[in-house]
Every structure is written in C-alpha cells, then in structure tokens.
Image: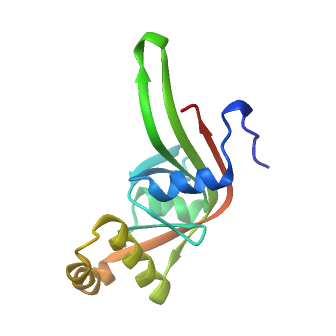
Amino acid sequence: MFYEIRRKDRAISDEKAVEILTNGEFGVLSSTGENGYAYGVPLNYVLTENKIYFHCFVESGHKIDNFKFNNKVSFCVVGKSEVIPNQFSTKYESVIAFGKISEVFEEEKIFALRDLLKKYSAGHEEKGEKYIQNDEHHTGVYKIEIEHLTGKSNI
C-alpha cells in the first residue's frame, strides 16, 4: 500500500520520526481535490497521541473541499536542514505521515486547541483560553489519524 523508502541508509527509527514531528514548527498538508490536482498548504500543528491536529476557518475552502472529496492526506515536516553548497547537497531530516483526516468537535476540539496553545503560545495560556472561548465557533479543528509514518535523515 505504501512505498518503502528508497534510500534505506537514510531511514530513521519511528521514535526519531515522532521526535521530529513533535518538535517541528510547521508542516505541509497535501490533499487531492475533485479536479485531480494535489494541493499542499503549510500550517501549524500539534502531534498528540499519534494524531496530528490543526485549526482553520470553519467555512469551506480549497483544503476543506478536498477533505470532503478524499479524506486521505499526507503531511510533511522538515526538521533541521542545511545546504552544503560545495558538496551540491543538503543535510536534512524529514518525516512524512500518511493518514485519514476528519473534523473534530466538542471536547476533542477544545483539547486540540489547548495543545496548540501550549505548543505555540506557552506562557500565554490565560489569554489563549479567552481566545479559544471567543472564537471557537469560527474555528474548525481537524485531525489526521496516522496510518503510516516514514522519516529520513543524513545529518
């Protein structure tokens, strides 16, 4: 169902892949639309209990319409990277997660928003709680349930 990594010498352990995914600042979510085109969008996220959560506006748009058409997505995070010009190469570490996406509601939605708050706005939780309460009805939260995870590194 999923391809094996071609460069097995660069494959990393599942534990290292989860570490990169946990510590990443942003990832690129890729989905497929009804028109057959792939769509990749960078976004903030949090990894919790082997699920990737992110938030967005509740109204339909390109990505939400794609999710309705096809709930299979991939999510790519690049950890450390460094271009090595004189070697015509790049040192890097990256992870790609494959899974199915769905919208979450009620308790799970609040839980995910609080985890996002902890990751991106540590020290501002009180203000963040007010933000969550005031904008909850304007905010959609989605999760990717990871089915397959691969990672590579040459660092």
Q: Who is closer to the viewer here, 82 or 55? A: 82
Report if residue 46 is visible in the image. yes
In percent of width and height, residue 45 lies at 43, 62
In terms of image quadrants, where is residue 60? bottom left
State left or right for residue 117 relative to residue 62. left
The vertical placement of 48 against 106, above or below, is: above
Residue under the image location 58 percent in, 31 percent down: 154
State left or right for residue 2 relative to residue 150. right
Residue under the image location 32 percent in, 82 percent down: 136
The vertical placement of 75 against 57, above or below, is: above
Residue under the image location 56 percent in, 53 percent down: 34
State left or right for residue 65 relative to residue 51. left
Q: Who is closer to the viewer here, 53 or 48? A: 48
Most extreme residue toward the top is 86
How many marks the image carries: the answer is 0
In percent of width and height, residue 20 lies at 52, 51
- The chosen color scheme is rainbow
In percent of width and height, residue 130 lies at 22, 85
